[in-house]
Image: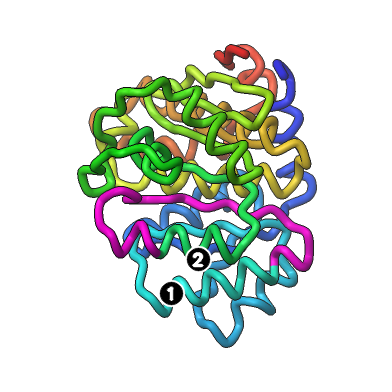
């Protein structure tokens, strides 16, 4: 998979997929921008009256429960079912799973009603969705005692999906494979929205690559290589965020291949 990230980056820029989002209101602007600077096309349509139609013209669907309400979840389910009918990938960010019963119940409702292809979250969020007993600190990760690769594989098997755990080292797993992504920079933890943006990037790359482990790996590698480049001259979180968008925009395949750090 050494060259898959640069190959997928080229496909995103050539194919310019439409990525439909029902996402976190806190980070929606950043999610739209990160998709745009990668070269794809974001759309953020949330109304129940149009989500199915909008998904019908999209190449991937990204769902994020960060700022969920009951009505919003119903719109997500309508969009998800439309995506399933069309056969495009559905990515679910289980943001805050494990924090409250309402959030856990609604997350389970989405997963029971929609065929979700990629489930993404931090360590405690994914552990919670996988059935482990953890408590999530808002949307921040808390300690998980069990091996994270095992949790990711178990969730992938249970839900017939690709599971992505983001953190200091990211884990991308399906029933048979697990890959570590070791790119990224600590500055990413100092701004709100880097996790939500990662989900949007994964959805963007899944829109052009059918192997969803490869797509998730490729998206994370490109995004996190750009973060490393942005951090080189950033003075703090504000300038880092500005430089991140510029770094993604100027990212090239040769740089991705040179800086990629992954382990199967």
The span shown in magenta is 83-105
Nearer-the-camera pick, 127 or 54: 127
CB atoms of marks 1 and 2 within 8 Å: yes
Q: Which quadrant is the C terminus positioned in?
A: top right
How far is disc 1 from disc 2 in space, using C-alphas?
8 Å
Q: Which quadrant is the N terminus positioned in?
A: top right
In the picture, the disc for residue 192 is none
Where in the figure is residue 249, as x and y percent of width and height?
57, 39
Dot 2 crowding, Cα within 10 Å, few <14, some 14–19, many 20+: many
Q: Tally the marks.
A: 2
Q: Residue shown at 35%/73% (left/top)?
A: 69
**SS assignment at label 1:** helix
Res 235 quadrant in image? top left
**SS assignment at label 2:** strand
The answer to whether residue 135 is seen in the rendering is: yes
Q: Residue shown at 69%/79% (left/top)?
A: 53
Where in the figure is residue 229, as x and y percent of width and height?
45, 23
Say whether residue 158 is magenta.
no
Residue under numbered circle 1: 72
Where in the figure is residue 262, as x and y percent of width and height?
58, 15
Residue under numbered circle 2: 22
Residue 40 placement, left or right of 167: right
């Amino acid at each position: 998979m050494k060259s898959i990230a640069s190959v997928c980056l080229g496909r995103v820029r050539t194919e310019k997929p439409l990525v439909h989002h029902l996402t976190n209101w806190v980070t929606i602007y950043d999610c739209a921008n990160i998709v745009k600077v990668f070269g794809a096309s974001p759309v953020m349509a949330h109304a129940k009256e149009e989500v199915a139609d909008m998904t019908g013209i999209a190449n991937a669907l990204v769902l994020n429960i960060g700022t969920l309400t009951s009505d919003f979840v119903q719109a997500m389910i309508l969009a998800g079912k439309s995506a399933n009918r069309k056969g495009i990938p559905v990515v679910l960010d289980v943001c805050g799973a494990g924090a409250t019963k309402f959030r856990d119940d609604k997350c389970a409702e989405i997963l029971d009603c929609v065929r979700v292809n990629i489930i993404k979250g931090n360590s405690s969020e994914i552990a919670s969705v996988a059935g482990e007993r953890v408590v999530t600190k808002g949307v921040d990760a808390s300690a998980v005692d069990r091996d994270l690769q095992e949790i990711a594989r178990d969730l992938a098997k249970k839900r017939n999906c690709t599971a992505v755990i983001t953190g200091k080292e990211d884990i991308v797993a399906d029933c048979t494979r697990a890959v570590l992504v070791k790119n990224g920079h600590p500055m990413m933890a100092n701004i709100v929205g880097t996790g939500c943006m990662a989900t949007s990037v994964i959805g963007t790359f899944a829109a052009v690559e059918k192997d969803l482990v490869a797509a998730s790996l490729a998206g994370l590698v490109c995004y996190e290589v750009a973060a490393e480049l942005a951090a080189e001259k950033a003075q703090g979180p504000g300038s880092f965020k500005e430089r991140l968008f510029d770094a993604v925009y100027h990212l090239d395949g040769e740089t991705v291949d040179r800086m990629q750090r992954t382990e199967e």
